[in-house]
Structures are given as structure tokens and as C-alpha cells.
Amino acid sequence: MKPSDTQLKLPLWSYDEVFPKKYKLVRERDNLIMEGTKIRWIEWNENESYNSDHYEPELGRSLILDPNEISCVWMTTEITEIIEQKKEYIKFRTLNSVYELFIEN
């Protein structure tokens, strides 16, 4: 019997199978698409330092896609207008772009 015959065989999996992408952010001007597993809405102090993070969008907040301790996939500038908001979709304008956020449930 060969050693490989007795070795435990583990199934292969991908990161996306374990942590599926739930959020898709599309920038309108160039259709740049960014995807992530979680989001937060960041509130800023008047001196532009971090204040707090939230689960809902609001004027003046920035969207951060896949936040973690040292980096993120994407962070927008502050929201200046919420154009359309539904349960699984938000279209909003920031200081320099328009974005669409698609949310899978």
C-alpha cells in the first residue's frame, strides 16, 4: 500500500466559496466594479479624522468596502446625495463620483 492511499483527502475550496461576495459597488463614470463580503459607513469629525462607523448610509458618510485592520478594497469620499435607496440597492453621489451598491441577501 502506498502512503498516498492512506492519506486523508481534504476537499478543495476557494475563498469565495467560504466567504461569498455579498456587495458589488459600481462607479458610474467608468463602470469600475469592486466586490466585497462586508461594508461599513464611516462618519468623520470636522477635522476629517475618524469618528465612528455605521450600518446605514447617511449624508457625510463614506462607504468602506471590506474593511479590516490595515486595509480595505475601496473607500469612497463623503456622500453628498442619496439618489435612490431600496432594500438591496443604493445609488449615491459622493464628492467626486456616483456609485451603485448592489446587496445580495
Image: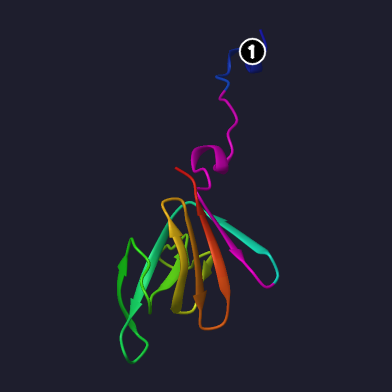
Residue picked out by circle 1: 5
Nearer to the camera, 69 or 93: 93
Residue 76 in view, yes or no = no
| Residue drawn at point x = 63 percent, y = 16 percent | 3
In the rendering, at what x and y percent does residue 53 appear? 32, 68
Highlighted magenta segment, given as a residue range = 10-29
Question: Is the residue 43 above or below the residue 85 in the image?
Answer: below
Question: Is the residue 65 above or below the residue 18 in the image?
Answer: below
User: Which of the 4 image quarters holds residue 33?
Assistant: bottom right
- The amino acid type of the residue labelled 1 equals Asp
User: Which of the 4 image quarters holds residue 62?
Assistant: bottom left
User: Which of the 4 image quarters holds residue 63?
Assistant: bottom left
Give the colour scheme of this rendering: rainbow
Q: Is residue 31 left or right of residue 34?
A: right
Question: Is the residue 41 above or below the residue 104 in the image?
Answer: below
Residue 75 in view, yes or no = yes
**Could you say whether the residue bearing mark 1 is in a helix, strand or loop?**
helix
| Residue drawn at point x = 44 percent, y = 79 percent | 78
In the rendered image, the quadrant that contains the N terminus is top right
In the rendered structure, does residue 95 fall within the stretch colored magenta?
no
Mark 1 Cα-neighbour bin, 10 Å: few <14, some 14–19, many ≥20: few
In the rendering, at what x and y percent does residue 29 appear? 67, 73
In the rendered structure, does residue 12 fall within the stretch colored magenta?
yes
